[in-house]
Structures are given as C-alpha cells and as structure tokens.
Image: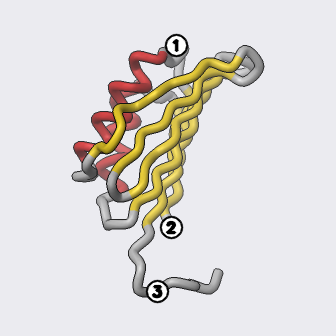
Amino acid sequence: MRDLAPTIVRQRLVVEGTVTVPVTADAIVEYLKAIGGLADMRVLNEPVTHLSPLYGWAGWVHWETSGAHFYAWDAPDLFFSVDMYACKGFDPEVIVEHTRSFFGATDLVSHGF
C-alpha cells in the first residue's frame, strides 16, 4: 500500500486470541487502560463498553494519539480481537505479551503494520 502521508506517524496492531472463559466489560476496561499505559498513550476519554445481543462485547478508548477497539465473542467461540491505532510509535511485543497474559489466551496471533 502506498503511503499517502509519509510525514505522519501511524502504527497499527491487531491482536486476536481464544480464551477459556468469557471476557467481561470490567476486563475490557482494565485491559484498555493497561495497554494505554504500556504504550505510553495519554487517555482523553476513559474506556467505554457496549454489549450487543447479536455480536457480544465491544470496547473503545480514545488516546491523544488515536485509540484502540476491543471486541469479544461468547459464541460461536470464546474469541477476542483488538485493534490499536496510534500516531506515535510503540513496542508491539509488549502489547502482545501483555494481552496473552492478561486474558490467559489459549491461542494468540498478531499483526503489526
């Protein structure tokens, strides 16, 4: 993909995993706060969550340097997906390892770009 704004820093990280217990709203809020700290992001709005009866939990946090989305399913599988976007650099491995540990993920994949 051609970089249309090479003078603007943009970093993304997607982390997905499977778990053995459902992810709760409280866990989503705690997790989003933690990754913001680990990536040295300044929180503009505290994390919010929403439960969709069709699709499960969603959460979002707004940072001065962008934000992160979190999605969790109870069915058909216990699964979560995180999408971080930042306008400043961060260490993706720190986020990946924290995510694995925090949720006790049984399987985890990630992709940074």
The amino acid type, in three-letter code, at marker 2 is Phe
Question: Residue 52's spot in the image, x, y percent?
Answer: 68, 20
Sequence-first tag of 2 and 1: 1
The answer to whether 34 is drawn above or below residue 38 in the figure is above
Q: Is residue 19 left or right of residue 40?
A: right
Q: CA distance from mark 3 to mark 2?
A: 14 Å
Helix, strand or loop at mark 3: loop
Q: Which labelled disc corresponds to residue 6?
A: 3
Between 64 and 21, the residue placed more toward the observer is 64
Vertical comparison of 61 with 8: above or below: above
Q: Residues under labels 2 and 1: Cα distance?
A: 29 Å
Occupied quadrant, residue 89: bottom left
In the rendered image, which residue does mark 1 sit on? Answer: 21
Of the residues shown, which amino acid type is indicated by label 1?
A: Val
What residue sits right under mark 2 in the picture?
A: 113
| Quadrant in the rendering for residue 98 | top left
Circle 1 crowding by C-alpha within 10 Å: few under 14, some 14–19, many from 20? few
x%, y% of residue 80? Answer: 57, 32
* Kind of element beneath mark 1: loop
